[in-house]
Image (tube, rainbow, N blue to C red):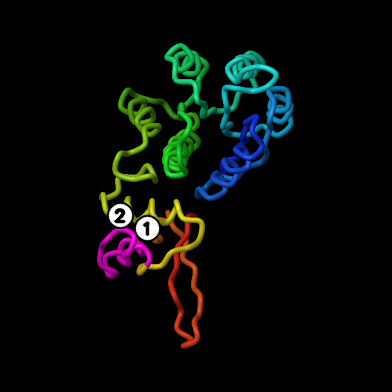
Amino acid sequence: MIRTLVVDDDFQVARIHAASVERVPGFTCIGQAHTAAEAAETVTATRPDLMILDIYLPDTDGLTLLRELAAQGDAPDTIVITAARDLATVRSAMSLGAVYYLVKPFGFPALAQQLLAYRRWHEQLTSEVGAQADQATVDSLFNLLRPAATGPAGDDLPVTMAKVLQAVTSNETPLGATDVARALGISRPTAQRYLSELERRKLLRLELSYGAAGRPVHRYRAGP
């Protein structure tokens, strides 16, 4: 599991981001911080793999926090989330090693897309510790941080399959094939085929419920 710290001065927004992290396969939220000081203390104490960091914090800005953590050798990988759109801030975030920059407001699919792209990058790096990298390997690692345009999982998914995945992961409750078919305007057998394939790829989790007739109803939610 990729241990993730959420840093945002808005308590409600932080809770939403934390809940979103928990919905993405392979991630767990280990804490929330609402000031730079609290974030620095939490990073030192818990050593998260990833930090989701807002720029605007009440005691100092997120970029200063990131700079101080980097100077101490404590900076985790960071996805910056902010309403700041000026290029100077974007450039500063990139120079400080941010792996991505999400401009507010954004929905769950955008965050999930980037988290899953990061997961693939993280898994590739950790699986090849000590290995030598040629240019093709370096290019591949950088490309993994770019979410695929075809689907929010960052995988090379067919367009319709990507839409099925997004429909399920953006919904609060699990969905069945009939729900997905109705939402996307596709046939139920097509929806079921894609749902089954996404479950096989461990991008969705199958849940069975039993109705009055005793026959199981297949429903899916985000998760391996």
Tag 1 near tag 2, CB within 8 Å? yes
Please name the amino acid that badge 1 sits on: Leu
Q: Which residues are magenta?
A: 179-196
> Badge 2: few (under 14), some or many (20 or more) residues near its Cα, within 10 Å?
many
Please name the amino acid that badge 2 sits on: Met
Q: Is residue 194 magenta?
A: yes
* Of pointers 1 and 2, the one earlier in the residue sequence: 2
Residue shown at 38% from the left, 51% from the top: 166
Residue 105 seen from this side? yes
Residue shown at 46% from the left, 88% from the top: 213
Characterize the magenta stretch by its predominant secondary structure.
helix
Give the vertical position of 147 relative to 57 (above or below): below
Residue shown at 48% from the left, 31% from the top: 104
User: On residue 198, which mark appears?
Assistant: 1
Q: Is residue 92 magenta?
A: no
- Label 2 sits on residue: 161
Residue 4: image x %, image y %? 60, 38
Give the vertical position of 136 relative to 106 (above or below): above
